[in-house]
Amino acid sequence: MKTIISAKYIKKMVFFTLMGLTATVIAQEEEEAKSKFEFSGTVDAYYRTNLTAPNEEDAIAPGSSFANLDGFSLGMANVIASYEGEKVGFVADLVFGPRGSDATFNSPQYLNSAGGGTGEIINQLYVYWNVSEDVTLTFGNFNTFLGYEVISPAANFNYSTSYLFSYGPFSHTGLKADFDLGSDWSAMLAVMNPTDLTELNGTGDYAVGAQLGYSGQFLNFLYSQGGFEIDYTGGFDVSEDFYLGVNAAHFSQEDNGGSFTGVALYPQLATSENFTIGLRGEYFMEGDFFGAIGASDADGDSSVLALTLTGSATIGDLILKPEIRLDSASEDAFIDNDSDPTSSLASILFAAIYSF
């Protein structure tokens, strides 16, 4: 009898142990399923003032996007909802504020009765399918594959952006295929709406893009409505504390539609775990009255050397960025404190960026 009771006791113990293990596994699976949904984003604001030009309404600023307002100014609130499944997923990336408006400047194509657009807060909105371990298809609106800099202020080292970034595309809408070729090689092919038409097409034309990558170095190509751009983006860890980023691009438009060529170097030195100092040195030139710099000679040609020194201090999830910038153009693209035309502009800013 004692043996039978012991056997029953052991069976009960095994049963409850298995039930406990099963419940634990189910809970872990549910937790993993929940963890596939993520909410993230940033909030940023800044102060900017000119040193060599007036700070008034419509104050003059560098000829690039995203940090051109004067005084205490707003950046944007960026809210990203995403789901990462084993095979499929999505990203819904919304922006609110002046920086977001700059990023989505040509999105509100589809006007409603009140005159507003449906895409004016959409930075990215796409779904993807991992067809295999080596192939991913992405469909929708996604940030550009061209260039070193991005829209997110937390992902850039410098707070203000370069001429190269400001006058390349910000986002595309279409279908792209990413390929992992092995041995650190990758490739991408894309069919998209014409450049800057991110909400709908409206033209009947399409753009094509391609990328070839190797070990963090990328060669990019874009053809859209008679305009062709080739872009190199990469970077090198020179040492444990010193990094050098590189961006170079050339754009030309058929039928005298303008052109630009530029190169930017991004040396960055980490002086501690929480502070890095970096310089963006950019040379940008344009032809045929492209209009990026703000002034041209009789042939429509001009150039600018832009030097931006930025410090980046991290305090938990907060990043503080003091920055000084000097733009020196070949033409009188700016004004001085007496409102006389001049070829240079010096400005400073201080930005605060919180990531969640």
Image: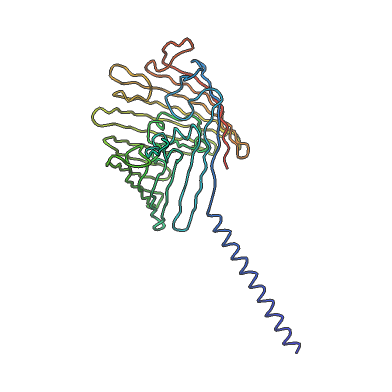
Q: Is residue 192 left or right of residue 50?
A: left
Viewer-side residue, 184 vs 24? 24
Query: In x, y percent, where is residue 94?
Result: 48, 42
Query: In x, y percent, where is residue 182?
Result: 39, 53
**Residue, far front:** 113
Q: How many marks?
A: 0
**Residue, far left:** 255
Query: In x, y percent, where is residue 43?
Result: 55, 37
Viewer-side residue, 336 vs 139? 139
Q: Is residue 25 left or right of residue 206?
A: right
Q: Indicate how the structure is coloured in the image.
A: rainbow
Q: Quadrant of residue 29?
A: bottom right
Q: Quadrant of the N terminus?
A: bottom right
Residue 18 in the image: above or below residue 104: below
Q: Quadrant of the C terminus?
A: top right
Q: Quadrant of residue 111?
A: top left
Residue drawn at x 70%, y 80% is: 10
Query: In x, y percent, where is residue 280?
Result: 47, 29
Residue drawn at x 44%, y 17% is: 344
Viewer-side residue, 22 vs 308? 22
**Residue, far bottom:** 1
